[in-house]
Image (cartoon, grey):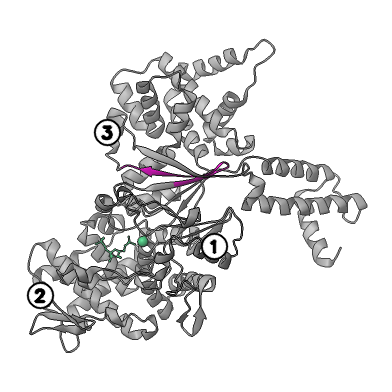
Amino acid sequence: MNQEQRKYLSLLAEKFPTRQAVCTEIINLAAIMNLPKGTEHFMSDIHGEYDAFLHIMNNCSGVIREKIEMIFADVLNDTEKRALRTLIYYPKEALQRLHSEGRISPKWYRETLRHMIEIARVLSSKYTRSKVRKAMPKEFGYIIDELLHALPDEDGNQLAYHERILDTIVGIQNGDEFIIALSALIKRLAVDHLHIVGDLFDRGADADKIIELLMDYHSLDIQWGNHDVLWMGAAAGNEACIANVVRNNVRYNNIRILESGYGISLRRLQLFAEKTYEGTPAKAMVKAINVMMFKAEGELILRHPEFEMQDRLLLDKVNPEKGTVTIDGVEYAMNTMEFPTVDWSDPYRMTPEEREVMDDLKRSFCQSPQLRRHIEFLYAVGSVYLKMNDNLLFHGCVPLTEDGQMEEVNFFGQFLRGKSYFEFCEKAARLAYNTGEARYVDFMFYLWGGPKSPMCGRVVKTFERSYLDDKASWKEPQDPYYLFLDSEATSRMILREFGLKSDLSHIINGHTPVHASAGENPIKAGGKLIVIDGGFSRAYHKTTGIAGYTLIYNSHGMRIKSHMPFESVERVISENLDIESRANQFEIEPYRVMVGDTDIGKRLAAQIEDLNELLTAYRDGSIPERVE
Ligand SMILES: O=P(O)(O)OC[C@H]1O[C@](O)(COP(=O)(O)O)[C@@H](O)[C@@H]1O
Ligand SMILES: [Mn+2]
């Protein structure tokens, strides 16, 4: 045993001081390795749609409904099954309604509790008892454990015992609390781990509420999307990011998230806009922030020729006399020439008033305590990409050349491609927020809208979409990555680049809406790549035809669930409606995937190895056991 090993084993010996303690731990770990792997759910592009997201979280992407259908196929009729569903999804609201309608009796409690315990029992079968106990609400932990695991005695008396427990709960009027606790446990057991493959913010109104929900979630990670890094850049004080955030939200009438969600007042912007631009206050604000945005972007792009975004410098291509702009040699008519703050000989300079408005916004974005809390959460659980259980998760793309090779980029003197580029982006994003170093803060804008950004991968044509009516100019050319979505060889090449060589490996992306209604399939590249942006965004439902996907990866394989648009929480509660979801099992594993096959399993195996060494050291006396 060398010095290092001895040091490490001695540390381990503090935790497991006797041979028996080591043996017990080895047995426990080995038992966990032989359980089926926990269920992972993957979602992306939530875009502020809180109600729909809350519903999917509550119905666990439709898994609870499936379990109810399976367990109670012949026991409950359709109406009863629907009522049970609603109760589990929204226990507080449903109980309130049932009470007010006088539909709750001791018998109802007993039956309902029995059904819920049955569901919890089925869902808990693939976890260790200790894990299930940890997942239980404290107050009811002991009693739920009893109800889930008590075995019949010699006289088959388990039933009587259970009935008595339930009678007591109902008798002392603790039924509602117990139902609420069981609902939480059922949801907790249905999803072991959640992945959000980017884009929580913008378009929909309530990203802040979604983040609050996620901050309470038991186990998750996030791969940053372009809209997330946009907000992260804004919180780091990037003016171009700030203007884009304000623009996105003013355009969609989402003032609430800025003003009361994050305490960022738009008052100054509004006053300035009303006195400077024509139209309603809302229209004037959009006009004002648009111009400020193109100015802030222009300054940033001019500071960083290496971003190669000069084609986005369009204010200086406007001909104010003719009311046209020339892009790539084509002259387009502008749909407005209302630019009262633009000095055409120096178009990217902000007027003193614009500067004041921007400084004010910047102070608010950098100082909002609630925004900081949320952004720090995104940093804590998020990353540019994640490798987990042989899958590779990222929001947008790995930039490729036209012939499908890894594209080389050059930022701040470094040549980067594939994995090294992703790691650079990640480090830059962290340095931007943590150190405020100017070039990294500027780089946040590149991550939002750069043609070779892993989160974007498009030429974003906001100028054209704002000021030109000719829609031919709106088309946003994409990185060649998107041309290779169906190439299995390309997906395998990318997976290899990130060190994933297993046949169980997949790429999982968001960012590009899948047009399900037009027959587009989210499963691409011979099953190696899955795009799960189904468009939670209400604004995009018309083109996607659905309201989002959940990818589910459990011990049997992978399935994708497509969710129909969500109506409202009120209708779920009053009519026991649910989101309709369709399931497609597209991959069945050749063998059941156990915890031992997962990343956690690999860590457990390494721990078992260390513990075995400690056992040997105890046996040969090279490390003494502690005598109690
Ligand atoms: O990552 P996403 O959701 O595609 O958002 C980025 C896209 O949004 C746009 O800004 C358009 O926004 P809107 O759909 O809100 O008009 C595009 O220019 C850009 O490509
Ligand atoms: Mn996106």
The answer to whether residue 251 is above or below residue 115 is below
Residues in magenta, as a range: 551-564
How many labels were placed on the picture?
A: 3
Residue kind at label 1, given as amino acid type: Arg
Please give the residue where the numbered disc 1 appears in the rendered image.
Answer: 492
Picture quarter with the C terminus: top right
**Tag 1 near tag 2, CB within 8 Å:** no
- Disc 3: residue Cβ within 8 A of ligand 1's nearest atom: no
Q: Quadrant of ligand 1?
A: bottom left
Residue type beneath disc 3 = Arg
Task: Determine whether the residue tagged by mark 2 lies in a helix, strand or loop.
Answer: loop
Secondary structure type for disc 3: helix
Q: Looking at this view, is 612 or 394 the one in front? A: 394
Callout 3 touching callout 1 (CB < 8 Å): no
Residue bearing the label numbered 2: 338
3D distance between C-alphas at marks 3 and 1: 45 Å
Percent coordinates x, y for residue 222 in the rendering? 46, 57
Residue 559 on the magenta segment:
yes
In primary-sequence order, the first of circles 1 and 2 is 2
Badge 1: few (under 14), some or many (20 or more) residues near its Cα, within 10 Å?
Answer: many
Q: Gap between marks 1 and 2, in whole Å?
A: 51 Å
Q: Which residue is mark 3?
A: 571
* Image coords of residue 442 (percent x, y): 38, 77
Residue 94, relative to residue 251: is it above or below? above
| Magenta portion: prevailing SS class | strand
Q: Is residue 67 left or right of residue 593?
A: left
